[in-house]
C-alpha cells in the first residue's frame, strides 16, 4: 500500500504547485500595480490641422463639417479657406470624418503622437442616379455657425443680379450703400471661397447674375491674424461666401443697358440729350477673375434756382466712368490682383441759402443771403494693386502699391449780402476760375511671421504716401462794403507737397490656451508744405499790375511726428469673449507761417492722447448673443486751429485760429442683443442696439458779426463781415436706439 500513498502525495503536489505559483504571481502583480498607480503621469494634449478640398487641391470647401470618433460627433466646420483645427486631443488613434453637401463623406484614421498636420482631405463628388424632385428645397439650413441659404428656393427674374437675390432673403438689406446681414455690415464677400473685388467688394452685387448662384453661406469670419496664427482672438466680422454652380467652370457673362429721356415736346428730347449707357463684361473661375465696366451719362439737370439773381447759362451733368479689375491665384496663399478706375465728368450746381440770426446787443435782426453757382470739368485715374506671397506656413508677405492722377478746371460765381435792421450793410459779388492738378503715390508693405507656439506672432508694417498739388486761380471781387465800393482782381498760385511715412510692429503672446496679450508700437512722420502767391491787378483783364497782395501771400509748413504704444488683453472661450486695452499717443506738431506784411508765426505743441477700449460678448445660447463695446479717444486741436492768423480770402467771411483751444475727449458705448431661430421652414431674427456718446471740450465754430470797422492783427475788417473762430463747447451727448426684426 505504501507505493500507492507516494503516488497520491506526488499527484497532489503536482496539482497544487501551479495554483500556489499563480496566487503568488497575482499577489506580486497586485503589489506592482499598487506601486505604479501612486506616481501620476502628465497628460499631454495635441493639435490636429487639415484642409478639406474637392477633386483638386485648389478647390477648398468652406463650411465642410468635421466629425470625430466612430459615433461621428460633430466638432467643427472649415473656415473660408477650407481649413480646420482640432485642439486638446489625447494621444492615440483618432477617427475623423469630413462631409460636404454634394460630396461623398470621407472617413480616415490618424495616429496622434505630436501636433499633427494631416494636409489635404479630398472629397469626391457624389454621383446620384436620375431622380424626379417634387418637394420644395428648404430656403435655410443651419450648419454649425454657418447659415446656408438655398438660392434655388427663391424665384427671381431671369436678368436678376446677386443684389436682387439678397434683397429677397430674410435679414438682408442695403443701407447707405452698405450690405447689412442680420443687423451687421458685411465686411467681406467671397466667391467660391476666394475674396472678390478687393478694392470694391460691393461690386459683386451688381456684376454676378443670380442665375449662377447655388448657395449663399453667411458666417462670422475670423481675423486675418487668427487664420494665419491658428489662435482664435475672438474678433469676428460678417462674411458671405457665394457658392456658384459648377465652381471650377469658367463663367463668362456681361450686360448692357441704355436709357434715353423723352421730353413733352419730342423735338426738345434731342436738344436735351438725356441718356444713360452702361456695359460690363466679366469672366472668372476659382483661380482667375477679370471684369471690365464702363458708363456714359448726361442727366442735363442744369435748371435755374427759383428767384435767382443769376439768369445766365446753367450747365450739364455729364460723366464717363470705366474700370478694370483682375485677380489671379497661383497657389494657396499666393495671388496678385489689381484695379484701374478712370472718370471724366462735367457738372454744374447751384444753391442758395438765407440765414437769420437771433437778436443781440448789436442788432434786432440780421439776415445773411447767399447764392452760388459752380461749373467744373474733371478727370481722374487710379491704379491699385496687391501682391500676396506666402513663403511657407510661417511667413506671409503683402505689398499694395497705388497711383493716382487727377486734374480739374472750375469756375464759380458767389453773391452774398448782409441786411441788418432792414438796412443793407454790404453786398459782394465774386468770380473765381481755377485749374488744379494732383499726383500721388502710396504703398503698404506687411510681413507676418508665426512662431512654433500657436498664437505667437510678429507683424511688421510700413506705409508711404507722397502727393503734390498745383493750383492756379483768378479771383475778381466787386463789393459794396459799409456803403463803400471795393474791387479786387487777383491771380493766385499755390503749390503743396505732402509726405507721410509710417512704420509699426506688433507682437502677440498667448498666456494660456484662452488668454492672449498683444503689444503694438507705431511711428509716423507727416510733412505738409505750401507756397502761395497772390498778385493784385487794377483791371479785370489782368493787364496792369498793382503788386503783391501781402495778406494772401505766404508759406506754410506743418511737421507732425507721432509715437503710439498700445496693449491689449484678450480672453476667449466658447461662451464669452472679453478684451480690454488702450493706447498712448505722444505727438509733436510744428506749424510755421511766413508772411510778407507780418512777423513769422511758429507754433510748437506736444500732445499726449489716451484711447481706452473694452469689448465684451456673451453667447446666452446658440442663437442669442449680447455684446458690449466702449471706446474713448482724446483728440488734440490742429496747429492751424491754434494759430491766431487771419484768413482774408473772402472779405465778408474771415476766419482765424484760437490759441486757447483745449483737447477734446470723446467716448462712446453700445450694447447689442441679437437672437435668431432657424429651421427648414421658418426663420426669425431680432436685433436691438442701444448706443450712447458724449464729448468734453468739443471743438465747434463761433460766428461774430463785426458791428463797425475794426483792425485785427493789422488787417482792417469792415462792418458787416463775419468773423469765425474755433471754440470749445461742453455737454455734447447723444443717445440712440434702433432695432430690426425679420
Image: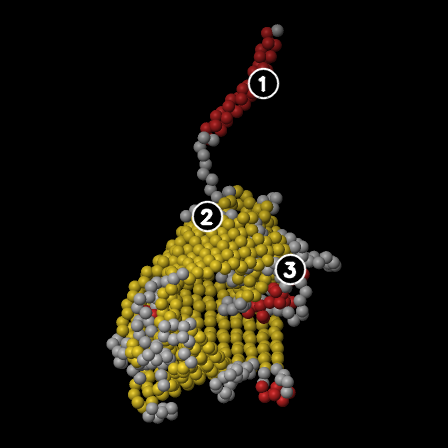
| Percent position of residue 570, x then y | 43, 51
Circle 1 SS class: helix
Q: Quadrant of the N terminus?
A: top right
Q: Earlier in the sequence, mark 1 or mark 2?
A: 1
| Percent position of residue 226, x then y | 47, 55
Residue wearing tag 3: 150
Q: Earlier in the sequence, mark 3 or mark 1?
A: 1
Q: Residue at x 67, y 70 (%)?
A: 158
Residue wearing tag 2: 514
Q: CA distance from mark 3 to mark 1?
A: 77 Å
Q: Quadrant of residue 404?
A: bottom left
Q: Residue at x 42, y 60 (%)?
A: 694
Q: Earlier in the sequence, mark 2 or mark 3?
A: 3
> Mark 1 against mark 2, which lies toward the viewer?
2
Circle 2 SS class: loop
Disc sitting over residue 15 in the figure: 1
Q: Residue at x 43, y 70 (%)?
A: 401
Circle 3 SS class: strand
| Percent position of residue 242, x then y | 59, 63
Q: CA distance from mark 2 to mark 3?
A: 35 Å
Q: Quadrant of residue 683?
A: bottom right
Instruction: Compare residues 227 and 739 and report the one nearer the observer.
Output: 739
Compared with 427, 386 (above or below) is: above
Q: CA distance from mark 1 to mark 2?
A: 63 Å
Instruction: Compare residues 660 and 343 and report the one nearer the observer.
Output: 660
Disc sitting over residue 446 in the figure: none
Q: Residue at x 69, y 58 (%)?
A: 137
- Specify few, some or many for label 3: CA neighbours under 10 Å numbering under 14, 14-19, or 20 or more: some
Amino acid at each position: 500500500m505504501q507505493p500507492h500513498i507516494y503516488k497520491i502525495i506526488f499527484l497532489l503536489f503536482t496539482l497544487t504547485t501551479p495554483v500556489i505559483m499563480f496566487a503568488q504571481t497575482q499577489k506580486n502583480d497586485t503589489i506592482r500595480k499598487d506601486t505604479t498607480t501612486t506616481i501620476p503621469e502628465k497628460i499631454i494634449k495635441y493639435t490636429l490641422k487639415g484642409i478639406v478640398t474637392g477633386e483638386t487641391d485648389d478647390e477648398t470647401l468652406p463650411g465642410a463639417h468635421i466629425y470625430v470618433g466612430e459615433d461621428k460627433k460633430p466638432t467643427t466646420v472649415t473656415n473660408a479657406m477650407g481649413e480646420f483645427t482640432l485642439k486638446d486631443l489625447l494621444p492615440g488613434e483618432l477617427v475623423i470624418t469630413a462631409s460636404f453637401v454634394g460630396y461623398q463623406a470621407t472617413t480616415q484614421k490618424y495616429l496622434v503622437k505630436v501636433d499633427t498636420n494631416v494636409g489635404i482631405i479630398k472629397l469626391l463628388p457624389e454621383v446620384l442616379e436620375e431622380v424626379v424632385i417634387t418637394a420644395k428645397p428648404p430656403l435655410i439650413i443651419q450648419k454649425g455657425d454657418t447659415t446656408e441659404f438655398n438660392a434655388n428656393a427663391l424665384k427671381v427674374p431671369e436678368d436678376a443680379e446677386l443684389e436682387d437675390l439678397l434683397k429677397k432673403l430674410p435679414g438682408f438689406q442695403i443701407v447707405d450703400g452698405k450690405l447689412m446681414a442680420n443687423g451687421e455690415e458685411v465686411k467681406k464677400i467671397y466667391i467660391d471661397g476666394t475674396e472678390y473685388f478687393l478694392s470694391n467688394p460691393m461690386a459683386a452685387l451688381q456684376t454676378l447674375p443670380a442665375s449662377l448662384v447655388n448657395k449663399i453661406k453667411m458666417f462670422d469670419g475670423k481675423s486675418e491674424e487668427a487664420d494665419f496664427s491658428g489662435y482664435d482672438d475672438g474678433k469676428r466680422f460678417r462674411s458671405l461666401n457665394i457658392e456658384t454652380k459648377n465652381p471650377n467652370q469658367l463663367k463668362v457673362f456681361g450686360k448692357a443697358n441704355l436709357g434715353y429721356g423723352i421730353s413733352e415736346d419730342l423735338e426738345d428730347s434731342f436738344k436735351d440729350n438725356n441718356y444713360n449707357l452702361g456695359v460690363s463684361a466679366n469672366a472668372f473661375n476659382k483661380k482667375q477673375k477679370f471684369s471690365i465696366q464702363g458708363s456714359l451719362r448726361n442727366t442735363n439737370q442744369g435748371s435755374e434756382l427759383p428767384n435767382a439773381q443769376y439768369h445766365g447759362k446753367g450747365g450739364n451733368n455729364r460723366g464717363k466712368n470705366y474700370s478694370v479689375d483682375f485677380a489671379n491665384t497661383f497657389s494657396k496663399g499666393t495671388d496678385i490682383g489689381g484695379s484701374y478706375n478712370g472718370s471724366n465728368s462735367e457738372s454744374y450746381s447751384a444753391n442758395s441759402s438765407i440765414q437769420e440770426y437771433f437778436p443781440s446787443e448789436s442788432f434786432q435782426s440780421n439776415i445773411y443771403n447767399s447764392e452760388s453757382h459752380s461749373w467744373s470739368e474733371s478727370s481722374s485715374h487710379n491704379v491699385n494693386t496687391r501682391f500676396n506671397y506666402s513663403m511657407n506656413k510661417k511667413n506671409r508677405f503683402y505689398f499694395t502699391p497705388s497711383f493716382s492722377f487727377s486734374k480739374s478746371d472750375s469756375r464759380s460765381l458767389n453773391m452774398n449780402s448782409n441786411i441788418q435792421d432792414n438796412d443793407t450793410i454790404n453786398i459782394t459779388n465774386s468770380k473765381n476760375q481755377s485749374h488744379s492738378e494732383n499726383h500721388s503715390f502710396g504703398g503698404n508693405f506687411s510681413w507676418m511671421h508665426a512662431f512654433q507656439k500657436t498664437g505667437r506672432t510678429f507683424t511688421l508694417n510700413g506705409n508711404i504716401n507722397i502727393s503734390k498739388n498745383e493750383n492756379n486761380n483768378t479771383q475778381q471781387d466787386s463789393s459794396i462794403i459799409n456803403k463803400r465800393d471795393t474791387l479786387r482782381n487777383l491771380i493766385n498760385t499755390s503749390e503743396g507737397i505732402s509726405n507721410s511715412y509710417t512704420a509699426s510692429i506688433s507682437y502677440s503672446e498667448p498666456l494660456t490656451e484662452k488668454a492672449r496679450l498683444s503689444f503694438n508700437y507705431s511711428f509716423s512722420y507727416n510733412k505738409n508744405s505750401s507756397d502761395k502767391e497772390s498778385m493784385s491787378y487794377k483791371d479785370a483783364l489782368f493787364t496792369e499790375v498793382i503788386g503783391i497782395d501781402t495778406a494772401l501771400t505766404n508759406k506754410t509748413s506743418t511737421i507732425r511726428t507721432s509715437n503710439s504704444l498700445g496693449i491689449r488683453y484678450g480672453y476667449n472661450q466658447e461662451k464669452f469673449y472679453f478684451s480690454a486695452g488702450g493706447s498712448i499717443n505722444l505727438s509733436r506738431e510744428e506749424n510755421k507761417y511766413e508772411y510778407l506784411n507780418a512777423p513769422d508765426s511758429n507754433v510748437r505743441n506736444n500732445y499726449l492722447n489716451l484711447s481706452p477700449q473694452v469689448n465684451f460678448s456673451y453667447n446666452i445660447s446658440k442663437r442669442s448673443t449680447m455684446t458690449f463695446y466702449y471706446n474713448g479717444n482724446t483728440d488734440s486741436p490742429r496747429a492751424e486751429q491754434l494759430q491766431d492768423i487771419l484768413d482774408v480770402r473772402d472779405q465778408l467771411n474771415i476766419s482765424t485760429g484760437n490759441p486757447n483751444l483745449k483737447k477734446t475727449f470723446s467716448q462712446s458705448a453700445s450694447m447689442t442683443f441679437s437672437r435668431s431661430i432657424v429651421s427648414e421652414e421658418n426663420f426669425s431674427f431680432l436685433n436691438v442696439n442701444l448706443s450712447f456718446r458724449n464729448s468734453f471740450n468739443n471743438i465747434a465754430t463761433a460766428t461774430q458779426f463785426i458791428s463797425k470797422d475794426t483792425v485785427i492783427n493789422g488787417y482792417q475788417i469792415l462792418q458787416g463781415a463775419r468773423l469765425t473762430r474755433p471754440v470749445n463747447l461742453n455737454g455734447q451727448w447723444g443717445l440712440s436706439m434702433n432695432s430690426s426684426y425679420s
